[in-house]
Image (spheres, rainbow, N blue to C red):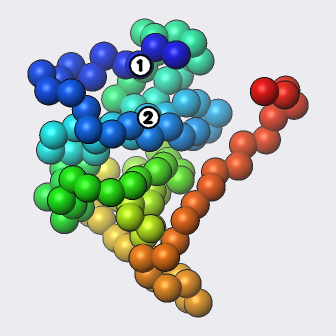
Amino acid sequence: MTQPDFGLDDPLHDLSLGVSRDCLCILAHANDSLDIWVMKYYGNKDSWNKLFAIPFMELCYNGIGFFSLLYISEEDGQVFFDLNYEVYVYNYKNRTLKIPKIQGLPSNRFTSNVYVESLTSP
């Protein structure tokens, strides 16, 4: 699979794959942001689009840890992801970050899996 042209002088630190609305997504840990990329047409390198970048200063993130994409809501301008076992909701339209509290679930002990239904076998 061909990666998007990240357009960076320095190499990426980490990549995380995800799926949103039947499109392949990449969360790319660049030097100062977490960049969200979506491949609109699977297998077509030219269809990679950078949706937005979340500046690390808004995440209070030190650049070390595990992150994965949970869901992108383009209508609401929100992206749901987990970072170091906590759920984050980032609104990329107004640049706000929330860490929702889930009753009965200790913060910092959350793990996620994304389920994608398919009629084809791998």
For the residue marked with disc 2, what is the amino acid?
Ile
Eyeballing the image, is 60 above or below 105? Answer: above
Residue under label 1: 3
For the residue marked with disc 1, what is the amino acid?
Gln
Q: Residue lying at the far bottom in this picture: please name it.
A: 104
- Horizontal and vertical percent for residue 28? 33, 37
Left or right: residue 55 compared with residue 37 = left
Q: Secondary structure at mark 2?
A: strand
Q: Secondary structure at mark 1?
A: loop
Residue under label 2: 26
- Horizontal and vertical percent for residue 81? 45, 56
Task: For marks 1 and 2, give the CA distance.
Answer: 9 Å
Tell me if I can see residue 26 in this picture: yes
Quadrant in the picture for the C terminus: top right
- Residue contact between numbered discs 1 and 2, judged by CB atoms under 8 Å: yes
Relative to the observer, which residue lies in front, 39 or 32?
32
Residue 120: image quadrant is top right
Residue 60: image quadrant is bottom left
Eyeballing the image, is 72 above or below 118? Answer: below
Residue at x 52%, y 71% (from the top left corner): 110
Residue 65: image quadrant is bottom left
Left or right: residue 118 compared with residue 26 = right
Relative to the observer, which residue lies in front, 104 or 71?
104
Residue at x 58%, y 60% (from the top left corner): 112
Say the numbered circle drawn on residue 66: none
Left or right: residue 121 compared with residue 14 = right
